[in-house]
Image (cartoon, grey):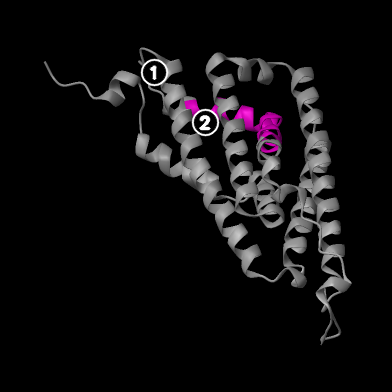
Amino acid sequence: APAVSSRTMLGIQDLPLFIVAGLALNITPGQDTIYIIGRSAAGGLRAGVAAALGIGAGCLIHVCAAVLGLSALLASSAPLFNAMKLAGAAYLAWVALGMLNSAWQRARAAGPAGTTPGRVMGRPGPAASRPAPSRPAAADPAAFWPTLRQGCLTNALNPKVALFFLAFLPQFVSRDAVHPALAMAVLGAIFCLNGTLWCLFVAWSAARLARRAAPETRLAALLEASGGALMLWLAARLALSEPR
């Protein structure tokens, strides 16, 4: 009898194409990338890793929903879709305002442009003459889990991501699959793994850039403020998008 590959048994088709398409979609900048960059700039690599893992957890929730058929229910119910859309937009706006406030506090702690704690207009001064800049909350090790949870919710509350998985995953499940739900689960796990690895790379890159830049240049504050502003714009676009 001819050998049966594991891909045939699982009912997965065009796996290489699925991986390439998934990576292309993950690399495309979006809401998740903006959030990770902002958190990495504010709290360093630890906060960025927490944000990336949270985004990955949110994707897993959508995969499970697609496998269990909950995404199909969301797609068929306009009131449910619109309610989730507004809830997601409200949460995005809340996260964005938090990022903007954190960036404002960071900029104030850095002092006026061109100055640093203990230095005014290029002349040295005693370091003790100014209070040390407050440590951002996101940099606190205790904030790892709240940041992870926040990243998970920013992704999980986006109904468009749920509809994406519902439309994308079945395209790579063969019609004669014995266990189509298992095939979708495996594909979703592959997509989430590749996406999380990419998000971790984004977190590492953003944290490295923010760390190499001196705090007094306000680059970290600028990155976080830019991320917050973009997140606020995304929240408004989601809320104002045409209802179903």
Residue drawn where x is 67% and y is 45% of the image:
141
| Residue projecting furthest to the left | 1
Q: Compared to 25, does 40 lie above or below?
A: below
Task: Quarter of the image for the N terminus: give it.
Answer: top left
What residue does disc 2 label? 168
Q: Which residues are magenta?
A: 149-169
Tell us which disc is closer to us: 1 or 2: 2
Nearer to me, 188 or 18? 188
Task: Quarter of the image for the C terminus: give it.
Answer: top right
The crowd level at tag 2 (other Cα within 10 Å; few <14, some 14-19, many 20+) is some
Q: Are marks 1 and 2 in contact (CB under 8 Å)?
A: no
| Residue projecting furthest to the bottom | 123
x and y, in percent, of residue 216 in the image: 77, 71
Residue drawn where x is 71% and y is 29% of the image:
157
In reply to whether residue 157 is colored magenta, the answer given is yes
Left or right of 136? Residue 14 is left
Left or right of 196? Residue 35 is right
x and y, in percent, of residue 185 in the image: 46, 23
Q: Quadrant of residue 155?
A: top right
Left or right of 221? Residue 152 is left
Q: CA distance from mark 1 to mark 2?
A: 15 Å
Q: What amino acid is at disc 1?
A: Arg
In reply to whether residue 238 is colored magenta, the answer given is no
Nearer to me, 127 or 189? 127
x and y, in percent, of residue 78 in the image: 76, 19
- For numbered disc 1, what is the local secondary structure? loop
What residue does disc 1 label? 175
Secondary structure mostly seen in magenta is helix
Q: What amino acid is at disc 2?
A: Phe
Residue drawn where x is 67% and y is 32% of the image:
160
Left or right of 16? Residue 89 is right
